[in-house]
Amino acid sequence: MGYRVAVVGATGAVGREMLKTLAERNFPIDDIAAVASGRSAGSQVSFGDKRVLTVQNLEKFDFTGWDIGLFSPGASISAIHAPRAAAAGCIVIDNTSQFRMDHDVPLVVPEVNPQALKRVKRGIIANPNCSTIQMVVALKPLHDRFRIKRVVVATYQSVSGAGKEGMDELHVQTKAGFVNDPIVNEVFTKPIAYNCIPHIDKFMDDGSTKEEWKMAVETRKILDPDIKVFATCVRVPVFIGHSEAVNVEFELPVTVEEARALLREAPGVTVFDQHEDGGYITPIECQGEDATFVSRLRRDPTVENGLAFWCVSDNLRKGAALNAVQIAETLVAQGLLARKAA
């Protein structure tokens, strides 16, 4: 027997990736529903190689009898419909930012803190921010062994983090540049083609952006409340795949060889670290892959017990859809998800 799974926001980039990931990983499903806004109702999306689903209207969708809701419809929509689904007995795994910092909602990366799933009180589990997920997957084995004091990270985030509209804008602007047409920006604050924008999400009072704030507070909630994190988040003209330059200061002495050995054994991490031309992973190489790739491991001599590395991951997969599906898989493995009769 399988489960009844509703994918909410099924017509978006992450929603489609959720459907694809469920099919690829053979998640045990008895019934699957594609759900989205009223304007998308009646359209069709693919589930696996041979099945097409007709999109149902979220406003009218009854979550009674559904086991799992994988949500990625936008924070304001999740705020309304995730509690409604949870009240109907459907376990919600929400990919938006709406519930991440609620004290009674677990914020989970299965390779890092699966034990948090035992504290689901409201029927809602939060998927962390895409840039946070890949970083904590790489930091977890290092923190367990050497204890992290401080992290300074610069991100290079693809336009798919802004959804289909962001990808479309990069595509249109890139073509316009080739034929010398005017470059018009609507999604981003400045042209993204042939450019980098040090601004993701809204600015906060201290001059940080909300994306930078998310990386700090989410890392502390997931990994350790005592870790200090300072982030600079940059949007770059890449379609899929987030990259991060991570600098870590530890309490205990660390060597590159020890760190490399730990990371090679860590779940969800692939180390490709050759100190030669091309001996590292770039965003285009991580597309469609599940792992967080770590390269360019080296000692930072400017601080005591310092280490630096480069990490890359597909933000639509591990940064969103895959992590949500892995949460569902972990619920099943831990016996925390009871099937409902169809």
Image (spheres, rainbow, N blue to C red):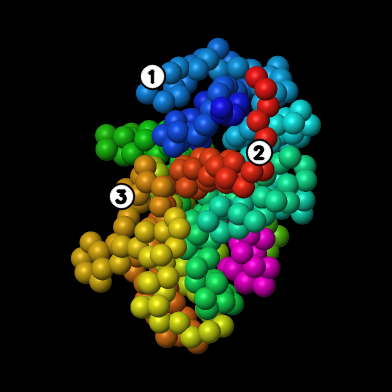
Check disc 2: other Cα within 10 Å, few if <14, some if 14-19, many if 20+: some
Q: Is residue 24 above or below residue 242?
A: above
Residue 51's x, y, as percent?
A: 43, 18
Left or right of residue 45, residue 120 in this image: right
Residue at (33%, 35%) from the top-left corner? Answer: 176
The answer, for residue 161, to whether it is visible in the render is no
Magenta highlight range = 211-230
Residue that mark 2 sits on: 337
Quarter of the image with the N terminus is top right
Residue kind at label 2, given as amino acid type: Leu
Residue that mark 1 sits on: 50
Q: Is residue 301 above or below residue 121?
A: below
Label 3, secondary structure: give it: helix
Res 41 quadrant in image:
top right
The answer, for residue 251, to whether it is visible in the render is yes
Q: Is residue 155 above or below residue 170?
A: below
Of marks 3 and 1, the one in the foreground: 1
Residue that mark 3 sits on: 285
